[in-house]
Amino acid sequence: MTTKTLKIEGMTCASCARAVERVTGKLDGVSGASVNLATEKLTLEYDESKLSIESVRDAIDRAGYKAIDEDTVADEDKDIKENEQRSLRLRFIISLIATVPLLYISMGHMIGLPLPEFIDPTINPLAFAITQLILTIPVVAVGYRYYIVGFKTLFKGSPNMDSLIAIGTGAAVLYGIFALIQILRGDASYAMDLYFESAAVILTLITLGKYFETVSKGKTSEAIKKLMGLAPKTATVLRNDREIEIPIDEVKVGDIIVVKPGEKIPVDGVVISGITSVDESMLTGESIPVEKHPGDNVTGASINKNGSVQYKATRVGKDTTLAQIIKLVEDAQGSKAPIAKLADIISGYFVPIVIILSILSGLAWYFIGGESAVFALTIFISVLVIACPCALGLATPTAIMVGTGKGAENGVLIKSGEALETAHMIDTVVFDKTGTITEGKPKVTDIYSVDNITEEELLMISASAEKGSEHPLGEAIVEYAESKGIQIKKASDFKAIPGHGIEVTIDDKNILLGNRKLMTERKIPLNNMEDISDKFANEGKTPMYIAIDSKPAGIIAVADTVKDSSKKAIERLHNMGITVAMVTGDNTRTAQAIANQVGIDRVLSEVLPEDKANEIKKLQSEGIRVAMVGDGINDAPALAQADLGIAIGSGTDVAMESADIVLMRSDLMDVPTAIKLSRSTIRNIKQNLFWAFAYNTIGIPIAMGVLHIFGGPLLNPMIAGAAMSLSSVSVVTNALRLKRFKPND
């Protein structure tokens, strides 16, 4: 299956999005079609062997919309949005210039405002009507798109918000022309029944609402703009031993790039010469510059502080770390949360139902209620104009756009709307221990040897055995031995025993190094070493047994320091009502000692790497919604199994690929931040949906004349038009309140 993103032009409401999903979803070879109204993008999953992208575009064109490849509009998107805003502002100004005098002429005399004799309805009703028509024409002309799109989608069987506007205002204008003809035929009473001002005011107010909505929607993606603004526009590369400046798009993998003090690093790479310090706060949030030497990696958009370096480009264009972060945020902003499904289903039927209700209510008042044709027309237009599928369609995506953008600003990359929604339901957070709760950089603290073996000899054997291991505990032993100047011997027949330890041969002797399980399985007597081991474990240290030729040789204890942020993060999670668990391969005593230090509620110890996912399953079987926080390759299955996987940004690529949320700053305080942001976003979405549903639930019956039955006033179509515009703007404005989100409040 291939995934493709297309920019869709011409969508105005949730019904449009639903129509595009429907026509593309029916195509043979399409397995999934999802439209995001806020980003105006279609995400399509399809089989290239069965369907071409041209066929998809044709289907969308036939539905009344236009599909453009996302890559071709990426650089122009900002200009397109600005042009759209300028166009809407100009259309509103033209409409306003015509509508203000139109309102004065049509309604001013009703409240005693003076009118020139030549357009006074009591003296010259024909001039009165013609003047209104002349002023209405420019308003209709600048709003032509409502009619073209509205009727096009109506005739294709997928009516949208523009269809409601086109039918409502079109009916008002046509009735006004009919009244004008009646005046020409000598019936001056029709001068009091013109509907030109209603059509003009409705179009003007809706254009104003669309302008405000476009401006507000532009603000929702400011996080993306900020991220894009981090990247430099040019790079200085070495070509034929000469430094030349080229656009960043022309940098290729393997190019040698020169970066001087104060300049931004253009793309990702590896330093080949020079020493400097680099400000990576844009990526890690760490304000202290990081020293870089030959062989060290540098990241595009970070700032070179005080030294000139040359480095080889390893990742350019869309492969750079910054580009991938931007892509993650864009994908999340374009995705749908499960909570949006209800609004999607309703909006798909919304417009046809509104059209039917408007016709039925108008006919009912005319035939059953015995009201005039003008009264019935007022009901018909009001119902069409007050209904607003926009508010429903924008309720969820706008909040997700702001929420994921705010997360990116705070170093929390949320990969999808589904992940954002899931986070607010989490009951238990499970932390991996090594590298997550702890620094992942353990140090040797104690050496205990038995029989005639010296501590130095035990350290030499252990370091020699671990030299081929990549385990953090093994690396700690090797580093400690090297710092003591101990000569490391060559080991052979290295064998890693996952979750237990290692087995090697040194000087023709069989060496076992690992936990108690390994010793028990190999039937090696531990004697009093168990007491020593328990003592170390109770102090939060990890005891590692060493056996030589099946005889116990001693214990080396290694301790991993707890991160400064671990205890604070766990306290905050507790304050949020969340249970905290820890999963580790360490023995129970060591794990419990660490747990006691930071306030862990539940300890899952002596868990083999491959069993971590099973431990998550067990928790889920208890009806608990689980978030897993980890950093290593062995955490990937557990991250994928959990309801929500959270990866530490400093961890492995596999872990980050498996996770739903990535903490770029590798700070555990960002775990409660992610959950708190989710809760704020979902609360905002529920508020938006409530007001969108409430607005239509209350507004449509009022427009149908329910209050009039009980002696109340009849809703003026102009007021209905204003209410329709305000409903969309209010939903987007409410979503923008998330921009005030603060992690520490």
Image (cartoon, rainbow, N blue to C red):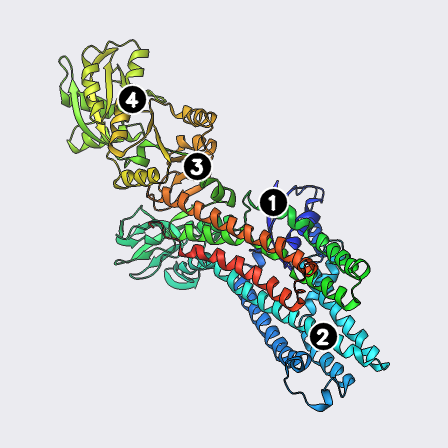
Q: Is residue 296 above or below residue 635?
A: below
Question: The disc labelled 3 sits on which kind of residue?
Answer: Ile
Nearest to the eye among marks 4 and 3: give it: 3
Question: Which residue is identified by label 4?
Answer: 588
Q: CA distance from mark 4 to mark 3?
A: 26 Å
Q: Residue furthest front?
A: 711
- Marked residue nearer the N-terminal end (3 or 2): 2
Task: Give me the residue at 30% from left, 62% from top.
Answer: 262
What residue did someone put label 1 on? Answer: 342
Taking depth in this image into account, of 426 and 480 the one nearest to the observer is: 426
Q: Residues within 10 Å of mark 3 (few under 14, many from 20)?
A: some
First in residue order: circle 1 vs circle 4: 1
CB of mark 2 within 8 Å of CB of mark 1? no
Q: How many marks?
A: 4
Please name the residue that numbered disc 2 is placed on: 196
Q: Name the disc covering residue 426, or none.
A: 3
**Residues at discs 3 and 2 in contact (Cβ within 8 Å):** no
Spot occupied by residue 318 in the image (x, y as percentages of width and height): 48, 51
When the figure is inspected, residue 669 is found, relative to residue 466, above or below; the finding is below
Query: Cα distance, mark 3 to mark 2?
Result: 56 Å
Could you tell me if the residues under marks 1 and 4 are in contact, i.e. CB atoms within 8 Å? Answer: no
Q: Secondary structure at mark 2?
A: helix
Mark 2 vs mark 1, foreground winner is 2
